[in-house]
Image (spheres, rainbow, N blue to C red):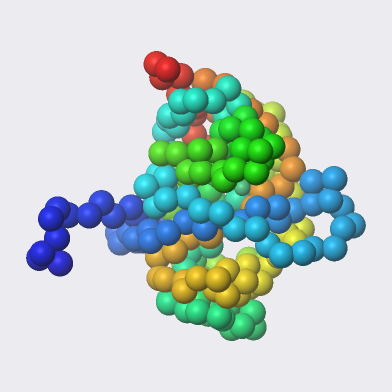
Amino acid sequence: MSDLLFAPAVASLPISGSDQRFPVARVFCLGRNYHWGDSAGQPRSVPLFFMKPASSVIEAVGELEYPTQTNEFCHEIELVVAIGADGFQIPAHQALEYVWGYGAGLDLTRRDLQMAAKAIGQPWEAAKAFDGSAPITPLVPVSRIGHPDKGAVWLSVNGVERQRSDLDAQIWSVAEVVSQLSQSVRLRAGDLIMTGTPPGVDALLPGDVITAEIEGIARLQVQVGERGQA
Ligand code: MN
């Protein structure tokens, strides 16, 4: 470490009920993990993963920066899984042993950029991986709450509910998500997995107050800031 040119920035999140913080390694995100109406009844295929950099993680408090280059800044409330041990090609029946804790997070999206990228087969980074695009609550350890597999998932904007589902409606369980992802990459302690959002994703405006909860895990409230200078 002493040979490093400068000290690396280490993203981290608070741990509920502790003075310690959880160091964030990488952020994996799962695509569709709840039926949105257009997919109801269809067989599940292979889970789609994309990434945000650790630098996109911020604490879900106070004001969110309204990102540049978008006119469709959207909210996605998601269960966040915090990985606490390294593992590769983990069988589903052992996968929960690698989960350290859980939180609630927003997979913030420049949806207009995502749609434009999808339309021409380009990657999603510009839509998903911008600074501050992953506000997350303090993480709650498994030692306190176990592995919740049911509980309301909801999000409201200015007191009006926009998203509501339940953890038991997820297409892929946490164990399946961890197992599937670990077939592709070596999971590391500190990795986070954002596990997909229910329907009701919509655009945010400056001044909007977002309240959201994963029942039994965490609740958050943030406000959308003013647009910066383009
Ligand atoms: Mn998402």
Residue extending farthest to the right is: 41
Where residue 154 appears, as percent x and y from the top left, is 67, 44
The residue lying toward the viewer, choosing from 62 and 83, is 83
Residue 76 lies in quadrant: top right
Visible residue check, residue 195:
no
Q: Position of residue 9 (x, y in %)?
A: 25, 51
Total labels: the figure holds 0
Residue at 57% x, 45% y is: 123
Return the residue nearer the eye: 198 or 60.
198
| Residue at x-position 40% and y-position 65% | 190
* Residue 180 in the image, given as x and y percentages of width and height: 62, 71
Q: Residue 115: horizontal and vertical position, in percent? A: 66, 35
Identity of the residue furthest to the front in this view: 120
Does 103 sit left or right of 190 as displayed?
Answer: right
Q: Quadrant of the C terminus?
A: top left
Of residues 155 and 30, which is closer to you in this image? 30
What residue is drawn where x is 57% and y is 29%? 73
- Would you say 211 lies left or right of 169 here? left
| 95 to 167, vertically: above or below | below
- Where 115 sits versus 100, above or below? above
